[in-house]
């Protein structure tokens, strides 16, 4: 059973702070990792994807992947109230199309 | 480019009925996947279609079926509806599918079964 675990939160951070969201996965064969943002009542929106160990940066977002420890994280710098949403982690094993989603972490950025 | 579109956006049905949902992927995308999202189970993969063929299937009963047309548009059908089928049904498109292709979700169809 492939599992993807996320702390449900809510994670509350002040505006301007760094928000750190974590995701662990059980399948060592996992090859591709995705972060989605989902506002309440809306559909998931792709923020970032990462395939290789290390960091990947895109604007205020940084994805970090550590395959040895089987975790992937998402850092949001200079957090804004508009970043308040649920963040979903999705993991795919190599050669498999079927992604496994975590249950998501609720992030609240307060002014 | 226009995004993924889904119709209808909202549906109310009663137990035992059947329902058909429609999805139009992003232009040029050939892979369409369907997901069910509920508060209790989260986001779960139903199936994926590529070039009119079901390429992958999740762990759902046979009441859930789908198809894809030559223009990549896809439909999902649920027969003999149960109360537990109430959920947000999401369609996602991808250029080619596969492990390394990102997916883009449509707005979803909110299905309520009474």
Image (cartoon, helix red, strand yellow):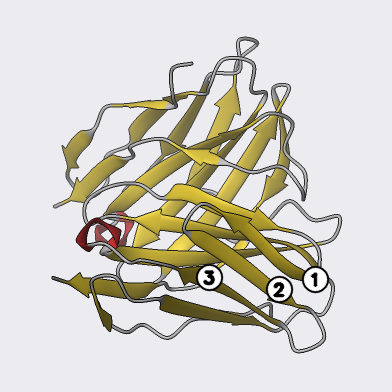
Q: Is residue A67 visible?
A: yes
B56 left or right of B3?
A: right
Number of numbered markers: 3
Q: Are marks 1 and 3 on the same chain?
A: yes
Badge 3 sits on which subunit?
A
**Whole-percent x, y for residue B49 in the image:** 66, 33
Residue at mark 2 to residue at mark 3: CA–CA distance: 9 Å
Name the residue nearer the viewer: B107 or A56: A56
The residue positioned 72% from the left and 38% from the top of the image is B97
Q: Which mark is residue A53?
A: 1
- Residue occupying the far bottom of the picture: A69
According to the picture, the residue beneath numbered tag 3 turns out to be A74
Residue A28 vs residue B24, the one in the foreground: A28
Where is residue A63? Give x, y as percent.
61, 66
Return the residue at label 2: A65
CB contact under 8 Å: marks 1 and 2: yes
Cβ–Cβ under 8 Å for marks 1 and 3: no
Q: Residue at x 26, y 62 (%)?
A: A80
Q: Residue at x 77, y 44 (%)?
A: B98
Q: For mark 2, does the 10 Å Cα neighbourhood hold few (<14), some (14 to 19), or many (20 or more) residues? A: many
Q: Earlier in the sequence, mark 1 or mark 2?
A: 1
Percent x, y of residue A71 = 66, 82
Question: SS for tag 1?
Answer: loop
Task: Say which label, 2 or 3, has the lower sequence index.
Answer: 2
Q: Which mark is residue A99?
A: none
């Amino acid at each position: 059973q492939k599992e993807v675990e996320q702390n449900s939160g809510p994670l509350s951070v002040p505006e301007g702070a760094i928000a750190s969201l974590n995701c662990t996965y059980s399948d060592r064969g996992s090859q591709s990792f995705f972060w989605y943002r989902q506002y309440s009542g809306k559909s998931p929106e792709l923020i970032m994807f990462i395939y290789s160990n290390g960091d990947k940066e895109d604007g205020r977002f940084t994805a970090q992947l550590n395959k040895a420890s089987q975790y992937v994280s998402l850092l949001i710098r200079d957090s804004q109230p508009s970043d308040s949403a649920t963040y979903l982690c999705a993991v795919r094993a190599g050669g498999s199309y079927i992604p496994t989603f975590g249950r998501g972490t609720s992030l609240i950025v307060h002014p | 480019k226009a995004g993924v579109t889904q119709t209808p956006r909202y549906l109310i049905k009663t137990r035992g009925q059947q329902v058909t949902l429609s999805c139009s992927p992003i232009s040029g995308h050939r892979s369409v996947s369907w997901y069910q999202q509920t508060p209790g189970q989260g986001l779960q993969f139903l199936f994926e279609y590529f070039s009119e063929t079901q390429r992958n299937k999740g762990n759902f009963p046979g009441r859930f079926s789908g198809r894809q047309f030559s223009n990549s548009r896809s439909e999902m059908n649920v027969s003999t509806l149960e109360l537990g089928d109430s959920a947000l049904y999401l369609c996602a498109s991808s250029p080619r599918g596969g492990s390394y292709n990102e997916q883009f979700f449509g707005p979803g169809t909110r299905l309520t079964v009474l």
